[in-house]
Amino acid sequence: MKMAWEPRLIVIACQWCTYQGADLAGSLRYSYPPTVHIVRVPCSGRVEPEFIAEALRRGADGVFIGGCHFGDCHYKEGNYKAIRRFKLFKRVATDLGIEPERIQLEWISGSEGKRFSEAMTEFDAKIRELGPNPLKGGAQ
Amino acid sequence: MSKPKLAYYLAGGCGGCDIAVVDLSEALVDVALQLDIVFWAPTVADVKYKDLEAMPDGSIDVGLFSGNVRNSEHEHIAKVLRQKCKVLIAFGICASCGGIKGLVNLHTTEQLLEKAYINTFSTDNPEKILPQTTVVVDGKYELTLPTLMDARALDQVVKVDYYIGGCPPYHEHIAKAFTALLSGQLPPPGSWITMGKAVCEVCDRNPVLKGKPKKLATEVKRTIDGAPSEDGCLLEEGYLCLGPVTQGDCGAKCPSANIPCRGCGGPIPGVKDFGLRAISAIASMLDNEELVDKIPDPVHLFYRYTLPSSFLGKRIKR
């Protein structure tokens, strides 16, 4: 019997903001979809385009990067670097046929537990609408 | 001691790598005397595929494979060479990463054939005849052509022992590689034969080498927009140079001639996907995020030589 498709979402979260936001969402008992798999990184500026591509290649249906709001970066300018890399990667990925909606970057602070749960719910709904990642099983 | 046996094959390439070997000039004479060239198709030696197939397995010491794997013939010879050669080297960026001709992966074979054989302005083909893989002439002679496939790097077909970058490899670098090969001083299998430095590290324009800080680019320029300064960093001036992530075995020849590095040398050690790391490096050297949207055609810029070896590999066709 074939199992119904469930999305697998990778959330790469900055340990100072978005990861704390996820923690707060848990403490406050806000629910968010179980399809979300969180990876903690020191800073959104640490997220290389390779991380996103590798996640997609290995079958993630969506990749969400969470960082601190501008001006809040623990390392001062990590999130500014993150958005430049992210925007450029997204342009290339779109040109190569990956739906741009599969990759998302958002600033969620440590006090925004509710926003974190909302963002995850929205992301999950969006990926369910898009369907499985066409790269699944490696680039053919 | 008998001379080491060498085989050379040009697959989906342009012959530029062959010319780069010839560019060794006098050094080639010394090298050639120390080697027994048993196969060099299709450019130099008159040895047939069946002769190569008849050689015992593992009887050739070094095989150089230039060009990417683009059709069934290339794939077949790649597998034969792997069996016959003790050491198989991906020679040049096409064999190593897919090369500039790897950009065909952005299109379907049907699109490419239509463009080349029907739609091109100078083509006169009213019957819309396309190449076929087999055809029978006079009812009895069957002629065949290889089947086109998506472009692949050599290591996507067979195991590769060493990689040499460059489009083509710089001749002084080839001389060093041959010397290393003949003296047996090779790095661990699976690595690139390179000095391991980025183009920036050997570039005369690099401000860091002159003790000055590197500034962020405040605009994005194409090579046709004005002329760069005499000795300033091309990236600082807004010409998108891929020097930071490219192997500098060429000695930074392009930046010294006012041309930004395009990444033919292959990725610096530790980088698996050249294009993605180039995106990362260039994006973080831009002054603000608006500049990202001003980069014309990023796929062709960042994946000019390495699309088939990328994590993403090719355009998803629906």
Image: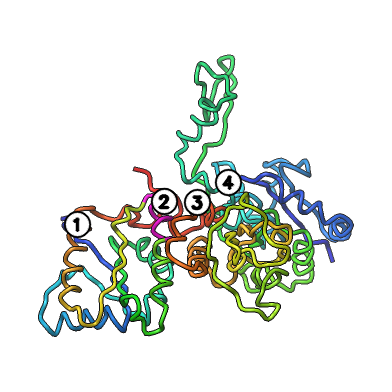
Q: Residue at x 57, y 19 (%)?
A: B124
As for residue A89 lying within the magenta part, the answer is yes
Instruction: Give the distance between the C-alpha atoms of the residues marked 3 and 2, in whole angstroms.
Output: 15 Å
Residue B89 in the image, given as x and y percentages of width and height:
66, 60
Mark 2 neighbour density, 10 Å: few (under 14) some (14–19) many (20 or more): some
Q: Choose the circle earlier in sequence order: 4 or 3.
A: 4
Q: Which mark is residue B296?
A: 3
User: Dot 2 corresponds to which residue?
Assistant: A96
Mark 3 neighbour density, 10 Å: few (under 14) some (14–19) many (20 or more): few
Discs 3 and 2 share one subunit = no
Discs 1 and 3 share one subunit = no
Instruction: Give the distance between the C-alpha atoms of the residues marked 2 and 4, in whole angstroms.
Output: 16 Å
Discs 1 and 2 share one subunit = yes
The amino acid type found where label 3 is placed reads Pro
Q: Which mark is residue A128?
A: 1
Q: Choose the circle earlier in sequence order: 1 or 2.
A: 2
| Mark in the foreground, 4 or 3 | 3
User: Dot 4 corresponds to which residue?
Assistant: B101
Magenta-colored span: A88-97
Give the chain letter at badge 1.
Answer: A
Instruction: Give the distance between the C-alpha atoms of the residues marked 4 and 3, in whole angstroms.
Output: 20 Å
Instruction: Please indicate, yes or no, whether residue B190 appears anywhere in the rendered image.
Output: no
The amino acid type found where label 2 is placed reads Leu
For mark 1, give the secondary structure: helix
| Mark in the foreground, 3 or 2 | 3
Give the chain letter at badge 3.
Answer: B
Instruction: Please indicate, yes or no, whether residue A82 appears anywhere in the rendered image.
Output: yes
